[in-house]
Image (spheres, rainbow, N blue to C red):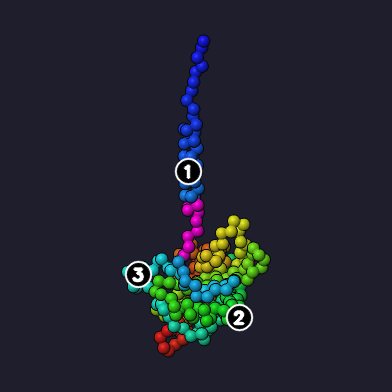
Amino acid sequence: MRRKKTTSSPTVPVRFLRVTLHVSRVIVLCAFAAGCAIPQVPSRTVYEDPVNFVRLELDATVLPEWPPGHFTHPAELSHEQMRRLLMGLTVQEHRAAIQRWIGGDSIRLPMFRDDEIVILVPQLVEALRLARENERVTYYLSQPQTSVKRIITSGGLYLKGTELHFILGNWQTVYGIPAYGMIYDRRYPMNPIVSKGFDLFFDLDQAMVRQHTSIWDWLLANSKDELVIDLARVFPGPTI
């Protein structure tokens, strides 16, 4: 009588293999999720309503051990001074030399609407008053169009000495909220959502401080994305 050949059951090794594969898959997914996570900029909220906000954001490029690089914060500006500055800011469509030769320069348009200035003036004054030497002020204004689309204007500002640095990240930009829900416009108000096609100006030419930029920034219309205004020329008299 032939004895049947017996084999050891692979149940335990298979279970161990399944558990190992499952744990490995979880580790890979967690690592992938961590790699794709959107970093959050440390900030303090000064003002926020359902569609607008003003915040103080930590600027990682400002080193505590290097005082010459610190912002001149906190800073005191009156409501009248802030209103004067905001009303003097204009935006002009960027045109290459050949475009200007054919069609001339585009007209300059106000950067902010009257209702936006009403919102920003008291909040920017308060933000500068509260800002620390390594914090910049950021602002975000939006006009909801649908549940998934809005028009935004956003950017930031900071003060160094008597020079006010004004950044316009987005101007009347249409933003569609993606289906997967990563909302970049509110998280990074100073970053442009699309390529910038505009230049910034102030109505008092002698108060604008010339910035030195590379030829590539000039070609890509990024040379004037940070407008610098000498407040001593706008408000002569007492130091700001």
In the displayed orientation, state which residue is furthest to the left.
65
Residue kind at label 3, given as amino acid type: Pro
Residue kind at label 1, given as amino acid type: Val
Residue 188, position as x, y percentages in the image: 51, 65
Residue 211 placement: quadrant: bottom left
The quadrant of the image that shows the C terminus is bottom left
Side of 100 relative to 20 (left or right): right
| Residue under label 3 | 64
Label 3: few (<14), some (14–19) or many (≥20) C-alpha neighbours in 10 Å: few
| Residue under label 1 | 23
Q: Is residue 95 visible?
A: no
Residue kind at label 2, given as amino acid type: Asp
Residue range highlighted in magenta: 33-41
Picture residue at 47% right of the left edge, 43% below the top = 23
Nearer the observer, 219 or 123? 123
Nearer the observer, 146 or 80? 146
Label 2: few (<14), some (14–19) or many (≥20) C-alpha neighbours in 10 Å: few
